[in-house]
Amino acid sequence: MMQRNFVFRHRITVCAAALAATLGAATAGAQTYPTRPVHLVASEAGGGGDIIARVIGQGLTPRLGQQVVVDNRGGGVIAGDLVAKAAPDGYTLLIYGDTLWLLPLMRARVPYDVVKDFAPITITSRAIAVLVVHPSLPVKSVKELIALAKSKPGQLNFSSAAAGSTNHLAAELFKSMANVNIVRIPFKGSPSAQNAVMTGETHMMFPLIATAMPQIQAGRLKALAVTSLQPTALAPGLPTMAASGLPGFEAVGNYGLFAPTGTPQAIITRLNQETNSVLSRTEVKERFFTLGLEAVGTTPEELTSTIKRGLTAMGKVIKDAGIRDE
């Protein structure tokens, strides 16, 4: 009996020693991280996520003491799959927008699980849309637009880019919350969709402020409200949709920074602190502002909450509207 107890205690001691060694190695690895270049996977070159990644990468390089290399990949599925399957060592990270977690709601098969495969680090930035109409449309507010749409069911239409794009989802949310019947007119991309409103081919759209503001200032588009919960300096003087008769309306594009699940917490913490420090710099805020973005910087938990809210709110919109992206 004593011999069995000795063997049992010996096994526990060996296991404890092995666990301590593993934890010790992980801690040591986190303390010396990084020792080689860090790859920041983002969208295709020239896209919003690419620009955000390059600004953050430039700021992180001196802070981490290693080169941060932007790795452009086309499409949320490709980029997400790559990072989800990468080694959880902090050397392969992902910057991507809402598409990353909304695509699984619009496709039958996606090779990653947003909740299980990624470790959230921070929300890097936020893109806000604006409701615009053709200048000839006889409305000056969201309430007047809703009244007009209800008086002409099925006669007003809206431009949108690809199914599930930010401007498409914002319009579908508007339809649902305002209980109006307006018709979607799809275009290949946001520029052509916005141009259709300017020429009078369509009545309205929810483009990003960055692309719409020059046309608003030139009088080619009439702006009614922004899609953030709070007014934004990106569009001074414009009310929010929420304050214009649709309480709780929010349709913004959030960009998050992620690592593969299993990345040591010490590395996640450092990346969060260093990235948020970059985002707090005046020159970075100004750079993002010129791109029509708000620099953010949050805790990992706030990014997780944002994803969950988005999945709930937009998940209902996607389901009710039958939106598919095949």
Image (tube, rainbow, N blue to C red):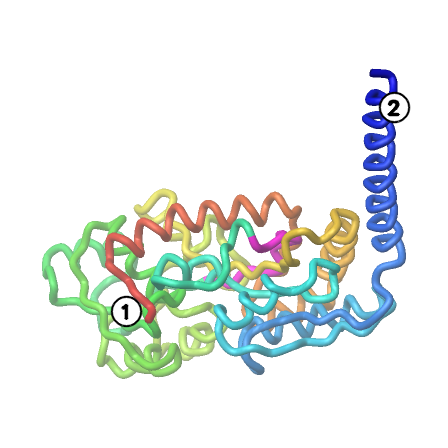
State whether residue 238 is above or below residue 178. below
Q: Residue at x 71, y 71 (%)?
A: 39
Q: Residue at x 49, y 69 (%)?
A: 76
State whether residue 100 is above or below residue 28. below
Q: Position of residue 80 (x, y in %)?
A: 54, 66
Q: Amino acid at mark 1?
A: Met
> Is 118 part of what is drawn in magenta?
yes
> Is 264 part of what is drawn in magenta?
no
Image quadrant holding the N terminus, namely top right
Residues 71 and 212: in front is 71
Residues 171 and 230: in front is 171
State whether residue 255 is above or below residue 7. below
Mark 2 neighbour class, 10 Å CA radius: few under 14, some 14 to 19, many 20 or more:
few
Disc 1, SS: strand
Q: Which residues are magenta?
A: 117-128
The circle on residue 6 is 2
Residue 154, picture quadrant? bottom left
Spatial distance from mark 2 to mark 1, Cα to Cα?
Answer: 78 Å
Disc 2, SS: helix
The residue that mark 1 highlights is: 204
Residues 104 and 207: in front is 104
- N-terminal of the pair, mark 2 or mark 1, is 2
Predominant secondary structure, magenta span: strand
Q: Residue at x 25, y 51 (%)?
A: 176
* Relative side of 36 to 138, left or right: right
